[in-house]
Image (cartoon, coloured by chain):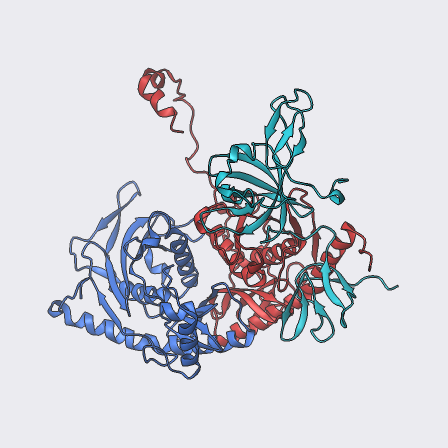
Chain colours: A cyan, B blue, C red
Amino acid sequence: MSPMKLCVPGDKLCSTEDCIPGTGIYLRHGCIYSSLTGYVLKKNEGEELPVISVVRETETQLLPDVGAIVTCKVTSINPRFAKVHILYVGSTPLKDRFRGTIRKEDVRATEKDKVETYKSFRPGDIVLAKVISLGDVQSNYLLTTAENELGVVVAHSEAGAQMVPISWCEMQCPQTHSKEFRKVARVQPEFLQA
Amino acid sequence: MATVQVSEAEKVYILHGIRDDLRVDGRGCEDYRHMEIETDVVSNTDGSAKVTLGDTAVLVGVKADIGKPRPKVPNEGYVEFFVDCSANATPEFEGRGGEELGTELSNTLYKVFNNKHSVDLKSLCISAGEHCWVLYVDVLLLQCDGNLYDAISVAIKAALFNTKIPRVHISADEEGGKEIELSDDPYDCVRLNVENVPCIVTLCKVGHRHVVDATLQEKACSVASLIISVTHKGTITCTRKVGGGSLDPESIFEMTEAGKRVGKALHAPLMKLLQQEESLGKARQKVGFLG
Amino acid sequence: MPDCFPHAVTFPFLCTTMPTDTKRVRGPEVSQSPTLFLCKHVAVLPSHGRRADGRQRDQVDVRPVFVRCGLVSQAKGSAYIEAGNTKLMCCVYGPREMERKDETDMKCGKLTTDMRFAPFSCLERGSWIQGSQDKDLSLMLHESLQPAVCLHKYPRSQIEVNVMVLENSGSVLAHAVTCASLALADAGIEMYDLVLGCSIRQNGASYVVDPSYMEENSCSSVSSENQGGLTVAFLPSLNQISGLQSDGEMNEETLTAGVRTCIEGCYKLYPVIQQALTKAVRRAAPPPSES
């Protein structure tokens, strides 16, 4: 097997007739050019043409995009929304801090009017959420936890111990056995190992 | 800088018009808008000029001060430029908003005048290594309607033409010290030779063509422009690409050629006009700022 | 320091009890570099024959460059470039959240550039505070880089480019452009093309490519026609000029020829830069499996 081809931004890779454009590339005048420094990767995904992309050792800088699942940490709460810091996009850690907001209406899918942010999140909780909008000039990224799989995954009790989920809306402290309210996520089993 | 919002439809209209050498206000691609020049508008300056180009209005005042020559060039005076983008021109300039544009403009002006011929700096020397004239050229933007560079350069040329530096005499006293004496006669003054002062031509790349003296709408359709400062002989003293886009080398060469042609043609009528105004003397009707 | 003020008011006697040394002869308020006191201020370099560092005149003879990516661990991407004695480094941070909320653009990201000279980088000591020359260079750097970066891929975020000049031995802007584009590519910022910089110094009929500090600041004793500097930033794969700046006096033909020479100089740099980048990628990780 020949060593994989390396390319730099601006390198012409092939014509659009030969490959399907993937990531790390851009199109110009019917040709595919590289927009990154990295390895040229051609993958056959069952289509007629292979998908061409340019990949790097570290994932290229991902920005939270609409629809992306993000892992965030709650920094503050008030009756209308919770403020969070986005830590991961998918499984890629972010180097820089991005702020997001989970509004009260976006905490859960049903009985939205009865949501109380204090009974859903507490500062310091680790929350799985989905990006619904990039927000506007004034606001941050808007996030939602209105799915069974989204919500609090890690939380600590007042005693400082990591709590165990006991229902979709409650968690219990293993030391004091006191119960606290949270919007708990039903974590998919395949992610539990990590 | 002051910008306008232009819709896609407007952009297409402007682009197609320019492709056929027809601009929205009826000009050709290498035509300037109506320009008005008035010199000697501020009495407290040594030279001043006001230029309006379309709705762009620029006021330039030149003040001559006595300073110490720069150690590197002891037998020359120097010229300082300062561009003030006042909040009068557009509210965006309020506070520190205009600072960035102001530095950009004044830095470009330094480059434009960074050669031996634009202004005869040796004539600004009073006594080598000790005293020289420092010309402070202060530019004030009164209104912004595109093409600031060209308007500013014409205004500077007019203001320098109008500048009257008082004559000074150096007398040595008994101990060998030198004393500067300013002439009592206000009409006893030195004029600057402005023949070689360049004019700036800004060429905006719109579509596949370029236009001279772009309005704000046309500027919004263009990604990059080229600034060229040209002397009356056609010598280029400064070029600079501005804006967020890039240009093809071939189009840069075309634009340089056009800029040189347009800039060269600008000088003769400008000098004629300035001399005409000067010859009117006191009979000249002053228009002032509201004209 | 605002909190000093009330002290001075409440305890005015403090000032009077401060010991002052009236006997000591104080130096001048502003110190000057000893180089200013040289007999010959501006070196006159010969305008024919070999250049001081042995390179050819009138040929695209750039200094050999040493480039390296990824030397600052904290930065997203970084690069170091060395050409002769010109040494500079660049760091790229981001994309990160916009610092100033009101400037957030929902459609595309913002590129910020900052270029600074270390105080000891030039012959004369500079100040830590960014002067207007640094600001101008930052702006030129910004205009040269922006056309190459796919900013639409980074909505509501900013990408910071910081260039520090460690040693100035001429052609600083050109090398800063090259170095910054390397650092951007190293950071994994999506770009349409690399940006390469090259500059020339015209001296009468002859020119020198990639001038050194001495060559940049020398003035020839021969004809004063066609004297000036030119810097071009070029996108080699797209064949586009993203930055252009010239000063001095040049006629159109010289300028056009100069731009072509600079483009040629950029192509000479291209393989070196490509190699440095691919080397950095290979060092960082082995090729991914092809499945």
Can you tell which quarter of the image residue B91 is in? bottom left
Q: Is residue A161 above or below residue A146?
A: above
Q: Residue furthest front?
A: A111
Name the one closer to the observer, C284 or C6. C284
Name the one closer to the observer, B17 or A174. A174
Q: Is residue A5 above or below residue A162?
A: below
Name the one closer to the observer, C286 or A43. A43
Quadrant placement of the N terminus of chain A? bottom right
Q: What is the tally of numbered marks visible in this picture?
A: 0
Q: Is residue C30 above or below residue B263?
A: above
Quadrant placement of the C terminus of chain A? top right
Q: Is residue B84 visible?
A: yes
Q: Residue furthest left?
A: B283
> In this rendering, would B101 be left or right of A87?
left
Q: Residue furthest right?
A: A1
Q: Residue furthest bottom?
A: B20
Name the one closer to the observer, A122 or B87. A122
Q: Is residue B164 visible?
A: no
Q: Residue at x 19, y 59 (%)?
A: B188
Picture coordinates of residue B156, whole percent (x, y): 31, 63
Picture coordinates of residue B145, whole percent (x, y): 32, 65
> In this rendering, would A90 be left or right of C230?
right
Can you tell which quarter of the image residue C151 is in? bottom right
> In this rendering, would A173 be left or right of B8?
right
Picture coordinates of residue A118, whole percent (x, y): 52, 32
Q: Residue at x 58, y 44 (%)?
A: A145
